[in-house]
Amino acid sequence: MRSALKDLASLVRRPHSIGVIRLRPAPRRISVFVALLMATCALHSAPRPNIVMIISDDMGYSDLGCYGGEIETPHLDRLAAGGLRFANYYSNNMCVVARASLMTGCYPGVAKQGSSLSRHCVTAPELLRQAGYTTLMSGKWHLSEEGREGSPNDRGFDHWYGTYLGAGSFFTPASLSRDDKNVEHEFREDPDYYYTDAITDNAIAFLNDAHQDSPEKPFFLYLAYTAAHWPLHAKAEDIAHYKGRYSMGWDELRKQRHARQLKMGLVDSKWPLSQRHPQVPAWQDEEHKAWQERRMEVYAAQVTSMDRNIGRVVDLLRSRGQLENTLILYQNDNGGCHVEYTENRKGAYLPEKTRDGRPVIPGNRPDIMPGPENTYQSYGYGWANASNTPFRLFKQHDHEGGIRSPLIAHWPRGIAARGDITRQVCHVTDLLPTFIELAGANYPETFKGNKIGPHVGRSLVAALQGGEAPERSTYFWKHARGKAVRVDDWKLVSENRKPWELYRLTPDGTELNNLVETNPEKAAELKKRFEDWDKRTNRKKKK
């Protein structure tokens, strides 16, 4: 008790966030007893925060302005300047597994069962709804199939608008639904329809309805944009805004982004910029420069459009006086995507025709400039390599370029930081326990008749408030072309079934110095940890 009182006394001598109240420095004459009483009152009287969870799709670590990019993202940059940036935040290496972990706090092998979330996991909206929150979603779900169980409404959201599929046209998004009812007629009837705008329109409509119907209830909004996942689709005026911006090419772009990252202290100056990927030619040797520039112009336009729409949500909250007590979190789902979209690739996400009847021409063809509705292209290896600056590799891989993500946290009432960077290592599975703590929710042993397994994350509330999150030293990944384990600053990682590589991330965050031969015992130790985790976690038959 004496130790606790001593710690509390130190808190009142400096600005500090306790719960969601930031205390001002107190006069020395205030007794420890009074300080204890003040802290207790603050913890129990402060209203629970609203939570807005924003996730983007297939974007790299360096794309945002506040993470070193030249793409114009003023609204996200403003949130970062008024809050906290995480330099060492990890997601998973693809869309579906990132979302599964975000929703459940579990590794994907536990969270996923077939094409849906497992009933032995409980989702953030399910928990928050039980705790008295209004739960809303707008955007990409990708955690169940249309017409099957496991929709957002089925897994805890009061209302949702968006798509089931992992990708789709920004002008005619397949599987478009509102509260489990297909509403694809909406884009057919609206010549100005653009999915990024529509995601925001519906999110704002949901917030307006919630404010009118239950103004006393806090809300949880999951805002899941598809920018900047292929296809490269953007409005003509947004593309024109970036005309000529990428004439320097990807080599110079990587250098410029890295220089800004170093200047802002985001990455360690001891880490060299990783080499250009072997499948990317030097810019001076690129044959189709005009087409390549256009690909990045459209990509940047998609990102700026998303940022503008995020600004609309922030403006709404500010106009209602809700911004002060709203925690806004932003992350990418994985690293930039290198995939070169081929002319023969098919899928339910690929429309045959535009709304006015023109054929859609798929494939990364240099004779066709991307952007309009009748095209279906991706931005490819060169620009994805730049997006993931300073790291190696891409989406689908568990090297840093595939799994390292920005995390921006903004909450004026609960976060004292203004533009700070934290280097605490954390993971997407840490978000669910963060939401639980903030909402005062309970994590159950059973839910709707199903036994619920434990989540693997730990709350980041202490980190948001300027302290240290509870210790978590070990992280695992396995999906698609990658597998990895990180223990403290040691990381064992494999690319697409190739031999294991071993890195010490504190001095070598860009993974350039493979230590597997010089540290065989450490490699063996981490491999054993990974294999033990893999056996108990991933249900797929091992090869």
Image (cartoon, rainbow, N blue to C red):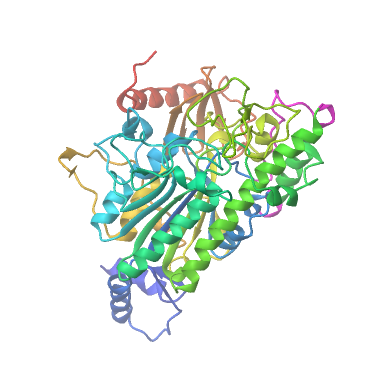
Asked if residue 389 shows in the view, the reply is: no
The residue closer to the viewer here, 283 or 311, is 311
Q: On the rendered structure, is 318 left or right of 303?
A: left
Look at the picture and state if 241 lies above or below 342: below
Outermost residue, left side: 449
Asked if residue 378 shows in the view, the reply is: yes
The residue closer to the viewer here, 67 or 221, is 221
- Rendered location of residue 123, percent (x, y): 30, 45
- Would you identify the image quadrant in which residue 98 lies? top left
- Rendered location of residue 520, percent (x, y): 51, 20
- Rendered location of residue 142, percent (x, y): 41, 37
Outermost residue, top side: 543
Residue at the image position 32 percent from the left and 78 percent from the top:
38
Q: On the rendered structure, is 397 left or right of 324?
A: right
The residue closer to the viewer here, 350 or 57, is 350
For the C terminus, the image quarter is: top left
Residue at the image position 43 percent from the left and 70 percent from the top:
322
For the N terminus, the image quarter is: bottom left
The residue closer to the viewer here, 51 or 107, is 51
Look at the picture and state if 243 lies above or below 519: below
- Rendered location of residue 480, percent (x, y): 48, 25
Outermost residue, right side: 284
Magenta residues span 261-287
Look at the picture and state if 405 lies above or below 325: above
Q: Is residue 7 magenta?
A: no
Q: Is residue 286 magenta?
A: yes
Q: Main secondary structure of the magenta part?
A: loop
